[in-house]
């Protein structure tokens, strides 16, 4: 190979290197962008605010006892909050956004990104913008406020994207816990059946609990063991889920009906927890639609519409989970 050819090749290598380093700048997304998305000390987080461009907002606030509230009005689903905190701790940059993808990703984050503000006791710690999934559904577009370059996030070992863990829809963060009062903290439980008032009753707690018929205020004979067991059933009772798609007109139609049952638990100190149950009509999703004779049932016997503490949000209640507290005056007095 001649000297001239060698020099020409060296010149081409130098030109190519200059072009790649100074024109293409493959390193610039990392160099110009912050990658410290994760939060090491999630135990110090006191508030998380999430919002999208459509006006949906969620504020999660940590209480002194370690529980979390939703929008300063409801108890938050602690399982989902813990998953969010774990995500904030574990998420990592999988790869930078390429120059070719840059404008598309930035535009997507601007229009469809979820703003996430994370606070600790000192104030605002970090602001993130969480976008949708990548094409392969295994990465999540994201940007830190004040940074010029977005990145693709993931959690090592997890296959999927992280956006659903940041959804700014309040109904998805609300706790489905209905009753969670230990027996020793219960003062009384009143169960009403408006359609069959002779089955309504009141259990009063004490050294020896008592059972009273609401219809005539007569004390009923039963065993203490049965009543103590009944009072012990009001812990960890969850609804199945809230209905985000039900309309206000449908809610009003349900509330115009007579409730199937009303359970009012009064805890020590006078705090009340109330659950109103309404029959749910038969649909194609109903598992048991017919009786033993093949006749269609008038309502769904496995799921009820529930309203907790007078709130207008529909919570589906499974009969399977609540049958132990949906006793009647008759069942509580049988075989005392």
Image: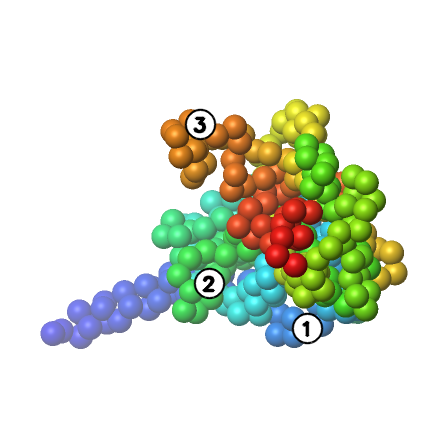
Identify the residue at horizontal 57%, vertical 67% (top origin).
Answer: 86
Residue under label 2: 154
| Image: 163 above or below 283 | below
Nearest to N terminus: mark 3 or mark 2: 2
- Please tell me whether mark 3 or mark 1 is closer to you in this view: 3
Identify the image's colour scheme: rainbow, by chain, secondary structure or one colour: rainbow
Identify the residue at horizontal 57%, vertical 63% (top origin).
Answer: 83
Is residue 319 visible in the rendered image? The answer is: yes
**SS for callout 1:** helix
Residue under label 3: 296
Mark 3 crowd level (few <14, some 14–19, many ≥20, 10 Å Cα): few
Query: For the N terminus, which image quadrant?
Result: bottom left
Which residue sits furthest right?
A: 269
Count of number-bearing discs: 3
Identify the residue at horizontal 82%, vertical 59% (top origin).
Answer: 187
Residue 98 position, x and y percent, is 42, 56
- Please tell me whether mark 1 or mark 2 is closer to you in this view: 1
- Please tell me whether mark 3 or mark 2 is closer to you in this view: 3
| Image: 301 above or below 109 | above
Nearest to N terminus: mark 1 or mark 2: 1
| Image: 125 above or below 195 | below
Residue 265 position, x and y percent, is 77, 53
Residue under label 1: 43
Does the residue at mark 3 contact the one at mark 2 (Cβ under 8 Å)?
Answer: no
**SS for callout 3:** loop
Q: Quadrant of residue 4?
A: bottom left
| Image: 296 above or below 51 | above
Mark 1 crowd level (few <14, some 14–19, many ≥20, 10 Å Cα): few
Residue 27 position, x and y percent, is 45, 65
Describe residue 311's horizontal placement relative to residue 156 as left or right: right
């Amino acid at each position: 190979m001649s000297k001239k050819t060698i020099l020409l090749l060296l010149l081409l290598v130098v030109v190519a290197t200059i072009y790649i380093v100074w024109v293409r700048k493959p390193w610039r997304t990392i160099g110009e962008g912050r990658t410290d998305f994760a939060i090491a000390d999630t135990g110090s987080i006191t508030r998380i605010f999430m919002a999208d461009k459509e006006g949906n907002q969620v504020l999660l606030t940590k209480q002194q006892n370690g529980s979390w509230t939703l929008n300063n009005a409801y108890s938050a689903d602690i399982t989902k909050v813990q998953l969010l905190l774990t995500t904030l701790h574990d998420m990592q940059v999988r790869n930078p956004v390429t120059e070719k993808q840059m404008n598309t990703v930035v535009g997507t984050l601007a229009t469809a990104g979820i703003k996430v503000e994370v606070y600790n006791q000192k104030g605002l710690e970090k602001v993130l913008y969480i976008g949708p999934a990548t094409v392969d559904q295994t990465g999540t577009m994201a940007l830190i406020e004040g940074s010029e370059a977005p990145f693709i996030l993931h959690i090592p070992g997890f296959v999927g994207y992280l956006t659903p863990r940041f959804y700014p829809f309040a109904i998805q963060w609300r706790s489905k816990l209905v009753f969670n009062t230990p027996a020793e903290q219960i003062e009384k439980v009143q169960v009403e059946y408006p359609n069959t008032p002779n089955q309504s009753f009141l259990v009063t707690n004490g050294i020896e609990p008592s059972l009273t018929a609401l219809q005539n205020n007569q004390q009923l004979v039963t065993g203490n063991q049965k009543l103590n067991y009944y009072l012990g059933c009001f812990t960890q009772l969850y609804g199945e889920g809230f209905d985000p798609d039900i309309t206000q007109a449908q809610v009003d139609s349900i509330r115009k009906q007579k409730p199937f049952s009303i359970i009012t638990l009064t805890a020590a100190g006078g705090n009340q927890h109330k659950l109103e149950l309404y029959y749910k009509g038969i649909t194609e999703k109903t598992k048991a639609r017919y009786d033993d004779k093949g006749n269609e049932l008038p309502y769904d016997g496995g799921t009820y519409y529930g309203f907790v503490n007078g709130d207008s949000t529909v919570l589906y209640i499974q009969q399977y989970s609540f049958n132990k507290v949906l006793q009647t005056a008759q069942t509580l007095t049988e075989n005392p």
